[in-house]
Amino acid sequence: MAKIKMTTPIVEMDGDEMTRILWKMIKEHLLNPFIELNTDYYDLGLEHRNETNDQVTFDSAEATKKYKVAVKCATITPNAARMPEYNLKEMWKSPNGTIRAILDGTVFRAPIVVKGIEPCVKNWKKPITIARHAYGDVYKNTEIKVPGPGKVELVYTGDDGTQIKELVHKYDGPGVAQGIHNLCGSIESFARSCFNYALDTKQDLWFATKDTISKKYDHTFKDIFQDIFDAEYKEKFDEAGIEYFYTLIDDAVARVMKSEGGYIWACKNYDGDVMSDMISSAFGSLAMMTSVLVSPEGYYEYEAAHGTVQRHYYKHLKGEETSTNSVATIFAWSGALRKRGELDQNQELMDFADKLEKATIDTIEEGKMTKDLALITTLPNPTVLNSEDFIKAIAEKLA
């Protein structure tokens, strides 16, 4: 059988630890036998990031701007313990954070739904996609411990010298205070990414803040979303038969729990951080969660939502067998290949992405799975496969 050809490369970002091992297996068994794989390769493994002073991360993001589609393996964000382990020059920043900032993207995370892995919420029938605004708020905060009586003020000083001043609190004794910020430009990019992705996937879009309490900060989010929707997207949504829906965050949580799923839930930074973990856990497993970074300019970067599976990697180094779930990493590749096919009008490549996902799901639904899924499945007598045998079982279905 002739291999599928690719006219334009995908940016390939290799990663760390056990996911790097799975990455190689996926290419060997599921991709190279069927596709003349065309990638612009960047090694984002921690050792190579250290050798290049992290320049490779910046280069991979710029390449994504050029080719518009990237697929990324999970990577280590080093802490103090990793410094001596990898002989690091410095504690390099999160590659995801660097790439996200360069591409000005929004992260969309959605569970992969299969029979036999039942959601904790019994009425959830379809995936719920979380769109997280990954800029600002508490993640870029400034904090102080208030030592004693006094006042904390919020002060803006314009370049022309004008000042706006608000009293935060008059303290009678010790306490704490923090300042958070966001940028209208970042919120606008977040809104457009959400609206574009909703159109791309033909799903309703929900957005929620607490504008009744935060009448300037959260209300600005609400107003920007509504203004952009009315001016640029309302007609497109009507044509696509999908809806944009705004509500308060507490109402959204209540509605989500009673819904069947099948929509995108846009969240501010903290809400998205918390709710994406809730959704992934309630649907069964973080290893069954897709993640795609989408920028308003039309750049797409696909990856698994989980980390590098460090514990399994150390077992692998000792020569011990592992049963590591590769599904989200497989779906990162299928997502990137489908988008590449879409942009290049390569139907054969798009069809292959669909077949790869179906083969993966069919393998699990037939009872062949990794240990983490076998522990939670409702299917009787599942067959537990090791890391490579699970990928080979999918390859047999593809062939």
Image: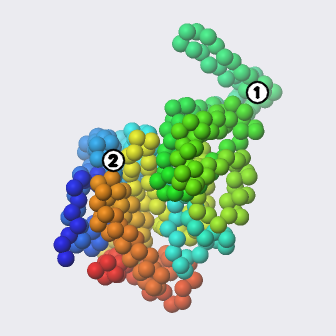
What's the residue at 60%, 35% (across, down)? 227
Quarter assignment of residue 164: top right
Q: Is residue 255 visible?
A: yes
Identify which amino acid the numbered label 1 is placed on: His
Question: Looking at the figure, which quarter contains the N terminus?
Answer: bottom left
Of residues 362 and 25, the one drawn nearer to the viewer in this rendering: 362
Q: Residue furthest top?
A: 161
Of residues 111 and 234, the one drawn nearer to the viewer in this rendering: 234
Reading the chain from its start, which is encountered first: label 2 or label 1?
2
Q: Position of residue 73 (x, y in %)?
A: 36, 58
What's the residue at 43%, 83% (across, down)? 368
Q: Position of residue 391 (x, y in %)?
A: 34, 76
Q: Position of residue 373 (x, y in %)?
A: 50, 77
User: Which mark lies nearer to you, 2 or 1?
Assistant: 2
In the visual, does 212 lie left or right of 1?
right
The residue singled out by tag 2 in the image is: 68
Identify which amino acid the numbered label 2 is placed on: Lys
Q: Residue furthest left?
A: 2
The Cα atoms of the two marked residues, 2 and 1, are separated by: 47 Å
Q: Position of residue 240 (x, y in %)?
A: 53, 54
In the drawing, what numbered circle is on residue 169?
1
